[in-house]
Amino acid sequence: MMEVSTCGFYDIYQKYPNMVVPNYQRAYTWDKEKVEELLADWGEYLQKEPTHSYYMGTLLLFYDKEKKGYEIIDGQQRLTTLALIYHTIKKEFLSGQDLVYNQMISAYNIANNFNFLNSKKEQLQQFNEADIFSKLDFSIIISDNQDHAFSFFDSQNNRGVSLGVDDYLKAYHLRALPEPLQAKRAKDWEAITFKAKKQDNHLLDLKHLFNEILFKVRKWRGQTTFPYPNEKNVLREFQKNTYKSGNDENFRLFPNRNNMRFQEIEVNDDGLNFISREKPISIIEYPFAIRQPIYKGQNFFDFTEKYHSIFDLFFNESVKKTKALQDSVNFYNAIYTSDMSEYLRYYMQMCLVAFYDNFGEEKLFEAIQYFDYYLGSMRLEKYYVRHEAIKNSLKHAELNLIDLIINAYLPNEIFGFIKGAKPIDDVYWNKKFLNDKGNLKNSVIERYIKRVCDFYGVATQKSDYLNQFKSRKEWIR
């Protein structure tokens, strides 16, 4: 059943009682700029067309027959903002406006917007005198089929703050969970989003993880397949291409270093002794493989939690690190600054996550140096490093580096490939970072070379480090 009607602001809460923000919904994300934009629109409307109604868009609600209540599928941002404005003016809520939010980022934005609205009391009083709330109209769509409601929402969502892939993925997989687990998983998910926002570090949000790391590592295979991580492709990979388990409480495991019962063999007089290293595992050691099939619901959240934990280990400064990790992070921070192409920064992040997934901290510091020797050749050879340069490096190399990292049995297999890559050596030995006049191609390349030399403490004079840079592979330790 799908019902469509129009409704005024005051009528919404009478006609559709018991409205809730479901656990699987994204957080309230409007900021003060978005609220200010709404107030400015209202001001312009009252000047030009005060006798007409003001259209606030469509509300999409799912009617839960068992609970006899309504879940807000689309409209949470507007309804929440209107509740804040109404309370700031009237000092009370309408019956039914007291929605409950269980996400930290929602509380953060609600508090900020409430404070902002309190600084606009004079303007709000003008809206009150104009009886703005009686002029607000909505289109209302009611569905008693949750899947149909979300299908409609996905195809029609083009208002307000657009959803990111992480919002879609959270909502999709929460719906596959039993209700008691939905609140916990939604809270965990939003805690990650809130931390990234609080630290003002977009690298730590889940959108970056899916778009720039997990999607590329999973889909950039061989030397012909390199799909672009746009919204459609990412959602296809982590929604449509996921599986439904026959038993929601059990999920198949796939080969990974963390689900091996035996990891060593000891030879003694009695023959072979298989040594088990079974121990309690942390989130970061969950026995998942980065390219494994993913099951809907619980398995998706566990998979995401593991790889976000690995990424967090490298790129969240507040996470405690071992010496091997700290040495690697120091190298990354020294070389892969904002002056470095973001495509190369994200490529290095892919390599580090894939390597750690396969080998943990084994030879990690050596690995990041070899990766930089390999990736740095692109920075040196290209005047500009664009998206296609990364793809071409995978296409034209003897092996796809990401494939090799994932499939190698030992780190030395990866190092051996990089050490033997003649086109990479050629960039350094034949100084392809110089132009026809013997000068560096641009200042970005010069600054990259200087950062590497500074890290290794090799040379300080330009003429010296340009001559020595050709042998930088020998600096790896």
Image (cartoon, rainbow, N blue to C red):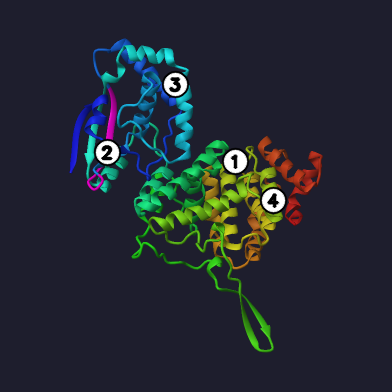
Distance from disc 2 to disc 4, alpha carbons, whole Å, reads 49 Å
Q: Amino acid at mark 3?
A: Leu
Judged left or right of residue 468, residue 428 is left
| Residue that badge 1 annotates | 341
Q: Is residue 310 or residue 1 the one in the foreground?
A: 1
Q: Is residue 36 or residue 21 the one in the foreground?
A: 21
| Residue that badge 2 annotates | 61
Magenta-drawn stretch, dominant element (helix, strand or loop): strand
Mark 3 neighbour class, 10 Å CA radius: few under 14, some 14 to 19, many 20 or more: many
Q: Which mark is residue 326?
A: 4
Q: Is residue 283 or residue 242 the one in the foreground?
A: 283
Nearest to N terminus: mark 3 or mark 1:
3
Q: Secondary structure at mark 2?
A: strand
The N terminus is located in which quarter?
A: top left
Q: Nearer the viewer, mark 2 or mark 4?
A: 2
Q: Nearer the viewer, mark 3 or mark 1?
A: 3
Nearest to N terminus: mark 1 or mark 2:
2
Residue at the spot 47% in from the left edge and 67% down from the top edge: 254
Q: Amino acid at mark 2?
A: Leu
Q: Amino acid at mark 4?
A: Gln
Residue at the spot 49% in from the left edge and 45% down from the top edge: 206
Judged left or right of residue 458, residue 165 is left
Residue at the spot 33% in from the left edge and 65% down from the top edge: 246
Residue 277 placement (x, y as % from top left)? 61, 71
Residue 301 placement (x, y as % from top left)? 44, 54
Q: Secondary structure at mark 3?
A: helix
Q: Nearer the viewer, mark 1 or mark 2?
A: 2
Magenta range is 55-67
Q: Is residue 477 or residue 113 the one in the foreground?
A: 113
